[in-house]
Image (cartoon, rainbow, N blue to C red):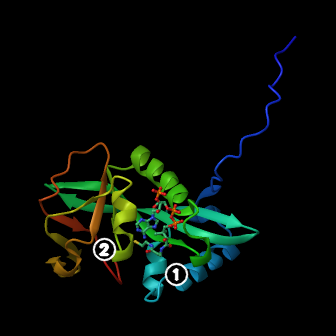
């Protein structure tokens, strides 16, 4: 006879956010539109380039009551470091609707994206807002201490205003956090 499940009273479990992980190509237009609108609500200074930077990779999406309340994505970029063009999983568009924060949704989305980073990229990187640095450092992200640069159409240029704002998640490749880090070029904020 198969063993029976004990009939103890159920212990309430902490609610875990359900995260859908999907490539941009598998996210329908309405959901992408909702994600864009969410990020425009979350960030006062959101631009069309910022939204474009969040596309072309994997999105972590959280819905509640049929509405999108959380978004984050990871896209591939090349970062030049110590003479190597590293394959980087760059995190973009991390936001939870204001009235749904503090319930684990941000952590659940980052769990999903960090798994992608660990399994597919040489490192993770992101440009952190001042308000969110503690959120990332508590998860093992480390501030880049060296100088930041970018490949512009006119050659490599310094991005001094970004120094101190870049955080990395080391995975398989050894990193010297005090050395130079150069990102590929894009329109809008390069980091
Ligand atoms: C940052 C943000 C995504 C976190 O989402 P969230 O759903 O509120 O986060 P969670 O509830 O999953 O919190 C996970 C942990 O991080 C902590 N945390 C959350 N936001 C934090 C913040 N801004 N600073 C420091 N710690 C933070 C929580 O206290 C919690 O800690 P615990 O595990 O010890 O309890 C959300 O606050 C947000 O959308 N902020 C505005 C947009 C923003 O700054 N995005 C980041 C841009 S780089």
Expressed as whole percent of the image width and height from the top left, the position of residue 80 reads 21, 60
User: Which callout, 2 or 1, points to the residue nearer the camera?
Assistant: 1
Instruction: Give yes or no for contact between labels 2 and 1 (Cβ–Cβ under 8 Å).
Output: no
Residue at 68% across, 69% down: 28
Residue at (63% x, 63% y) in the render: 62
- Circle 2 residues within 10 Å: few <14, some 14–19, many ≥20: many
Horizontal side of 168 relative to 45 (left or right) equals: left
| Residue plotted at (40% across, 46% down) | 118
Labels 2 and 1: the sequence-earlier one: 1
**In the figure, is residue 78 to the left or right of 40?**
left
Q: Is mark 1 within 8 Å of ligand 1?
A: yes
Expressed as whole percent of the image width and height from the top left, the position of residue 154 reads 18, 82
Residue under pointer 2: 191
Q: Quadrant of residue 127?
A: bottom left
Question: SS for tag 1?
Answer: helix
Tell me if 165 is positioned left or right of 48 in this view. left
Q: Quadrant of residue 10?
A: top right
Find residue 105 and name its label. Answer: none
The residue lying toward the viewer, choosing from 35 and 111, is 111
């Amino acid at each position: 006879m198969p063993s029976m499940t004990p009939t103890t009273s159920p212990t309430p479990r902490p609610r875990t956010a359900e995260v859908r992980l999907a490539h941009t190509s598998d996210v329908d237009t309405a959901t992408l539109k909702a994600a864009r609108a969410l990020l425009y609500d979350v960030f006062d200074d959101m631009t069309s380039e910022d939204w474009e930077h969040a596309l072309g990779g994997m999105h972590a999406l959280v819905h509640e009551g049929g509405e999108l309340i959380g978004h984050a994505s990871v896209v591939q970029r090349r970062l030049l470091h110590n003479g190597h063009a590293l394959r980087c999983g760059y995190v973009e568009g991390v936001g939870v609707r204001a009235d749904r924060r503090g319930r684990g949704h941000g952590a659940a989305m980052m769990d999903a994206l960090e798994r992608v980073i660990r399994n597919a990229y040489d490192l993770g990187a992101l440009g952190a807002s001042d308000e969110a640095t503690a959120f990332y450092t508590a998860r093992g992200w480390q501030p880049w201490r060296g100088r930041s640069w970018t490949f512009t159409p006119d050659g490599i240029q310094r991005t001094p205003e970004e120094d101190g704002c870049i955080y990395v998640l080391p995975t398989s490749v050894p990193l010297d956090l005090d050395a130079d880090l150069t990102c590929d070029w894009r329109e809008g904020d390069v980091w």
